[in-house]
């Protein structure tokens, strides 16, 4: 058995390991007298401010802890151990006393602890005689330090941070605090019982029985503690999942990073040079960097994203920093704006600072948002994470792929944050932006350290990449050394630092197919001079190598990827290409593509997580859109027509037979409905925005217009009852006037007028499919798919090929989960409930908390009726009647009178226009502190 001193020493060391160096130094010599003096000073300060608190609530704890120290002193140097009770207590009182809400809570906590602690002096001789009883003292000491560990951690931050976090974190600590109180009560009972046993002890067997009893007590206590820890962990994990769902960050960030890492690993050493750059090393490694913001910029296709992945991996390996990152993508709505970046960073930070989970969870419930959409709230959460965590790297790649207004929000926020931290702790928050050298970004980052990528920077990597591919090409086609040298030299001299150019050229050469074609590519045809010509070489190769029919498929696929309103999944592409509008069928066997999308489009596309198909780079979209190979106006017409005609198929009829509908679902006829139902009106909008001059007399344009005419005709006839509105707005008339020369003008006018008027109704209207009949059949069709997926006798591989693995989907077309879906109905239903009833009651064990409320007004009404103790009104009813004193303080400017001088001072500020009290949430300033506090309560209710 270890000595009692050793036992206390291990408990203390475990506690000290959770303190920082300053706290260990400040706490080590604090005494009871120091705490009493602190309490008296706080009482005096509060008396001067007329905000008296009942400080006598500390007395029971001070007395119990003082007696604990006296008893501990019988066999150990008590001052060493109790100093780390008095020290934290002094710190907690000093910090909490600056805010009445937290101070009230802390005083009451110490009162409860004191009431549950045993007064040990009456048992002093027992602890002196019996070593076994000293183990109970160790348990008491453990519980007191457990309380202080949590409290010190909570009050450690800056005032404007812990005040916002206090309620949510303390509420979560409630179960643990009750456990501590129960432990202390049981310790008290055990000490009393064993003292009585010792009073009558007659034999050695009695002493052994006492030891066995204490050991069993310790075992039971430890088991109970483990159960409580598991319960707390499970609850926090549940809240973490709910918050992650609320953040709704792009799911592919990690897989994108793995993909970029794999790309660079294919060529050994690729990008590692940037880690040796002087500016990068200064930003990463110096205690105080030249600037905490580093901007790496370069031309399109220079391999900036690959370099970003190198820097991210390097930062992730530094244990002294927490690293969060985000890859922007112009083509992906989940990755091309400010809130997407914030969501991505928050979702990573959540698991790295679990202390903030309770606060984030409360913000999630009170926000009324299914997904985090408020940039202001997101910035507030990020600010708290930056404050709470020690040192952080933030890396944002591709900022230029966000709209200028969105970039400005991001840059302004991070500049503000870095300036804030650099004032007191330079280098705590280090931010790296990687982008093209756009003027607005350059202007916003004038104070940042700038690293401009040049041709020489990645020349070695490019040469190594070219040589690796040249070996593959030589082995495949049997080239001579001279021919290989020509490829290497020709590509290298034209690369000008553009990795993307090199990648396109080398992969295009490798995929030529025959030696004759390869030799023609390098000897007959002009070698690409720049990235546009590299894209064109690939397109010409595809056209040359594909048959006429296959080339038409390639153009169709590329056109869809240029004009689609969201990234298409491969199964959606297969469905769209298999549609026969005349027969109203989708025949995958007859019309589906037998080769992969990579076979048709080569290195122009990439297949990402979730079976999403995207173009390889934003420059690819720009080139293909401007090339002669596709005509965007014709593609928009064809996509619009495809959606409109598809939505008039028999499976979207209101009176279709259930057996027929099940058969249609089994054959995959419903596999394009998510895209068509959500995006048809956006394609119509794109046509309206297209210049009439883009519709030329060439056969492709004429064929596309004929398809559009058929689509509008069929759609108008099917949904005429809802599409034709009582009035046609002048704006709709003007928008459609350029199309008066076409026979479909009248139908287009009615359809566009319906779309225009629906969108004018605002965000609430846009949450619904604009045509009620269509909305109803979509929901009905989804029920059929869900039933099929659950049927045991149905081919699961077949339904996955048509509809994916997530069949339970949100009914709101502007929601990500309208097309993404969930694997379980329960998850989908919870998601929808957050749409419909987003305001939740936070009162513990509320019987209707899981259902929520449709408005904040309904929530407040519920709280007043069922939880009046949580409302301000409850205080009004319990407040004592005050005697009104004579108003002897008079304002010389307006003759108003006041009962107290400080009220007059506050009033005079209103005349002077002074507003010294600022809201910690939104920054709004007030003349009176009470007005500011009343305003802050509005934030807690939302």
Image (spheres, grey):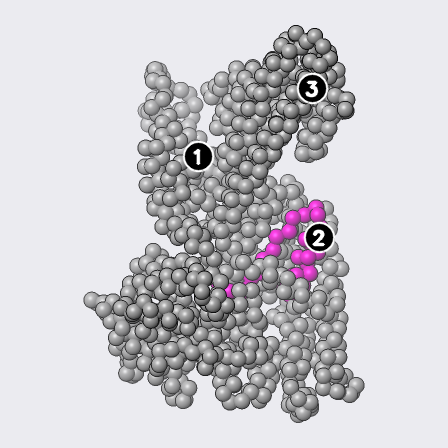
Q: Is residue 673 magenta?
A: no
- Indicate which disc, 1 or 2, sits on the residue closer to the N terminus: 2
Residue neighbourhood size for the residue with mark 1, other residues' Cα within 10 Å, grouped as few (<14), some (14–19), many (≥20): few
Residue nearer the viewer, 259 or 537: 259
Dividing the picture into quadrants, the one containing residue 888 is top left
Q: Nearer the viewer, residue 642 or 850?
A: 850
From the image, tell me which residue sits under label 3.
211
Q: Is residue 330 visible?
A: no
Which residue is label 2 attached to? 317
Q: Taking 86 as reference, is 800 left or right?
A: left
The answer to whether marks 1 and 3 mark residues whose Cβ atoms lie closer than 8 Å is no
The answer to whether 693 is drawn above or below residue 520 in the figure is above
Q: Residue 502 in the image: x percent, y percent?
A: 67, 76
Nearest to N terminus: mark 1 or mark 3: 3
Q: Quadrant of the C terminus?
A: top left
| Residue at image location 47% in from the left, 41% down from the top | 362
Of tags 2 and 3, which is closer to the observer? 3
Residue 49 position, x and y percent, is 48, 21
Depth-wise, is mark 1 or mark 2 nearer the camera?
Answer: 1
User: Residue 936: x and y, percent?
Assistant: 43, 36
Q: Quadrant of the N terminus?
A: top right
Horizontal and vertical percent position of residue 531:
61, 78
Q: Residue furthest right?
A: 481
Q: Secondary structure at mark 3?
A: helix
Q: 167 above or below 625?
A: above
Residue in view at x 67 percent, y 23 percent: 215
Write down the region rendered in magenta: 304-333
Q: CA distance from mark 2 to mark 3?
A: 49 Å
The residue that mark 1 highlights is 844
- Foreground pick, 210 / 372: 210
């Amino acid at each position: 058995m270890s000595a009692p001193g050793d036992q206390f020493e291990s408990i203390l060391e475990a506690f000290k390991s959770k303190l920082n160096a300053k706290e260990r130094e400040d706490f080590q010599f604090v005494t009871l007298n120091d705490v009493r003096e602190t309490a008296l000073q706080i009482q005096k300060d509060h008396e001067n401010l007329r905000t008296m608190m009942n400080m006598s609530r500390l007395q029971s704890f001070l007395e119990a802890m003082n007696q604990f120290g006296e008893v501990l002193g019988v066999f150990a140097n008590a001052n060493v151990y109790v100093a780390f009770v008095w020290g934290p207590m002094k710190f907690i009182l000093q910090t909490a006393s600056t805010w009445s809400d937290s101070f009230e809570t802390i005083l009451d906590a110490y009162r409860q602890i004191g009431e549950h602690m045993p007064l040990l002096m009456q048992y002093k001789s027992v602890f002196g005689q019996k070593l076994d009883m000293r183990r109970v003292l160790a348990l008491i000491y453990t519980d007191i330090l457990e309380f202080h560990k949590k409290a010190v951690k909570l009050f450690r931050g800056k005032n404007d941070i812990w005040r916002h976090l206090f309620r949510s974190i303390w509420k979560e600590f409630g179960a643990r605090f009750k456990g501590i109180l129960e432990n202390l009560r049981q310790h008290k009972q055990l000490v009393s019982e064993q003292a009585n046993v010792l009073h009558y002890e007659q034999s050695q067997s009695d002493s052994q029985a006492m030891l066995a009893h204490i050991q069993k007590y310790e075992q039971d206590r430890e088991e109970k503690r483990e159960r409580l820890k598991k319960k707390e962990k499970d609850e926090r994990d549940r809240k973490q999942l709910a918050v992650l769902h609320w953040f709704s960050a792009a799911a592919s960030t990690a897989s994108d990073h793995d993909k970029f890492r794999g790309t660079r690993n294919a060529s050994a050493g690729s990008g590692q040079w940037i880690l040796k750059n002087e500016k990068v090393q200064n930003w990463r490694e110096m205690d105080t960097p030249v600037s905490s913001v580093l901007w790496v910029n370069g031309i399109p296709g220079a391999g900036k994203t690959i370099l970003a992945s190198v820097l991210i991996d390097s930062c992730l390996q530094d244990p002294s920093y927490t690293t969060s990152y985000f890859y922007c993508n112009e083509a992906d709505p989940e990755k091309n704006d400010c809130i997407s970046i914030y969501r991505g960073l928050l979702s990573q930070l959540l698991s790295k600072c679990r202390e903030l989970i309770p606060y984030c969870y409360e913000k999630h419930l009170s926000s009324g948002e299914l997904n985090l959409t408020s940039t202001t709230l997101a910035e507030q959460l990020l600010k708290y994470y930056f404050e709470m965590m020690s040192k952080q790297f933030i890396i944002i790649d591709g900022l230029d792929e966000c709209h200028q207004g969105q970039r400005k929000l991001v840059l302004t926020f991070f500049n503000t944050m870095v300036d804030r931290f650099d004032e007191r702790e330079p280098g705590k928050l280090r931010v790296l932006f990687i982008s093209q050298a756009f003027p607005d970004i350059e202007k916003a980052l004038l104070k940042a350290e700038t690293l401009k990528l040049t041709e020489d920077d990645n020349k070695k990597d490019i040469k190594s990449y070219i040589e690796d591919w040249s070996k593959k090409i030589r082995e495949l086609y049997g080239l001579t050394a001279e021919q290989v040298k020509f490829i290497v030299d020709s590509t290298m001299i034209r690369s000008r630092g553009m990795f993307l150019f090199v990648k396109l050229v080398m992969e295009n050469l490798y995929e030529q197919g025959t030696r004759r074609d390869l030799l023609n590519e390098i000897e007959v045809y002009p070698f690409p001079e720049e990235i546009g010509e590299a894209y064109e070489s690939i397109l010409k190769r595809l056209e040359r190598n594909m048959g006429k029919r296959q080339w038409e498929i390639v153009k169709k696929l590329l056109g869809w990827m240029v004009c689609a309103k969201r990234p298409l999944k491969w199964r959606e592409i297969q469905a769209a290409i298999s549609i026969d509008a005349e027969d109203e069928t989708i025949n995958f066997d007859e019309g589906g593509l037998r080769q992969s999308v990579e076979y048709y489009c080569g290195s122009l596309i990439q297949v990402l997580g979730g079976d999403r198909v995207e173009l390889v780079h934003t420059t690819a979209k720009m080139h293909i859109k401007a090339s002669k190979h596709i005509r965007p106006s014709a593609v928009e017409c064809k996509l619009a027509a495809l959606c409109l005609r598809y939505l008039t198929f028999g499976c979207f009829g209101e009176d279709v037979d259930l057996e027929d509908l099940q058969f249609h679902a089994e054959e995959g006829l419903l596999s394009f409905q998510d895209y068509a139902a959500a995006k048809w009106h956006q394609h119509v909008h794109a046509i309206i925005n297209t210049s009439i001059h883009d519709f030329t007399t060439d056969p492709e344009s004429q064929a596309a217009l004929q398809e559009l005419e058929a689509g509008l005709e069929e759609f108008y006839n099917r949904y005429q009852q809802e599409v034709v509105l009582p009035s046609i707005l002048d704006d709709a008339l003007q928008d459609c006037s350029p199309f008066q020369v076409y026979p479909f003008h009248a139908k287009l006018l009615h359809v566009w007028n319906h779309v225009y008027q629906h969108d004018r109704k605002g965000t609430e209207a846009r949450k619904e499919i604009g045509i009620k009949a269509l909305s109803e059949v979509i929901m009905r069709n989804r029920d059929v798919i869900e039933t099929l997926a659950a049927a045991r006798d149905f081919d699961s591989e077949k339904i996955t090929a048509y509809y994916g693995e997530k069949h339970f989907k949100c009914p709101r077309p502007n929601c990500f989960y309208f097309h993404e879906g969930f694997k379980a109905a329960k998850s989908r239903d919870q998601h929808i409930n957050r749409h419909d009833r987003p305001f939740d009651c936070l009162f513990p064990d509320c019987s209707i908390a899981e259902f929520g409320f449709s408005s904040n007004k309904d929530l407040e009404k519920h709280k007043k009726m069922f939880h009046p103790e949580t409302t301000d009104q409850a205080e009004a009813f319990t407040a004592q009647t005050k005697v009104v004193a004579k108003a002897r303080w008079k304002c010389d400017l307006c003759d108003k009178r006041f009962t107290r001088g400080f009220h007059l001072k506050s009033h005079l500020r209103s005349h002077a226009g002074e507003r010294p009290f600022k809201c910690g949430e939104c920054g709004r300033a007030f003349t009176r502190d009470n007005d500011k506090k009343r305003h802050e309560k509005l934030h807690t209710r939302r």
